[in-house]
Amino acid sequence: MADTSTTATTATTTAMPGKYKVSVLRDKCIGAASCVAIAPKVFGLDKDQKAFIISQDELDDMKLLAAQSCPTAAIVITNIETGEQVWPR
């Protein structure tokens, strides 16, 4: 039997394992791509060489490591259970 309890809230949101949600502040992104190197299932670069979210489907530790690797702190990590911003502090 299929699980119908999970529905996407927007066209770009996917089911998230763990408790962290990532987002990109595009105006701060310089296209260094460290996030893509660390978590290629989560991040990609668009035609303007700005990071974008492919999927939230990655381990929380990998999402956090990718965010911490960003030289401009353009990646925000939010705890979806508490609403607290985890990174950057």
Image: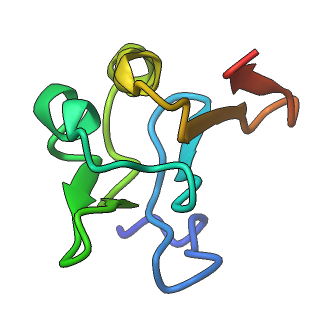
Q: How many marks?
A: 0
Q: From the top left corner, tell me how far across and down residue 70 is, in percent.
A: 40, 27
Q: From the top left corner, tell me how far across and down residue 57 is, in percent.
A: 33, 45
Q: Which colour scheme is used?
A: rainbow
Q: From the top left corner, tell me how far across and down residue 43 is, in percent.
A: 27, 50
Decide if residue 68 is on the left or right side of residue 54. Answer: right
- Figure quadrant of the N terminus: bottom left
Query: Residue 74 versus residue 62: which sits nearer the camera?
Result: 74
In the image, what residue occupies the spot 28% across and 34% down?
Answer: 35
Query: Residue 72 versus residue 69: which sits nearer the camera?
Result: 72
- In the image, residue 53 sits, relative to residue 19, either above or below, namely below
Q: Which quarter of the picture shows residue 49?
A: bottom left
Q: Which quarter of the picture shows residue 78?
A: top right
- Figure quadrant of the C terminus: top right
In the image, what residue occupies the spot 65% across and 77% down?
Answer: 9
Decide if residue 4 is on the left or right side of residue 39. Answer: right
Instruction: In the displayed orientation, state which residue is furthest to the bottom.
Output: 11
In the image, what residue occupies the spot 37% across and 69% down?
Answer: 2
Q: From the top left corner, tell me how far across and down residue 29 is, in percent.
A: 44, 50
In the image, what residue occupies the spot 52% across and 72% down?
Answer: 4
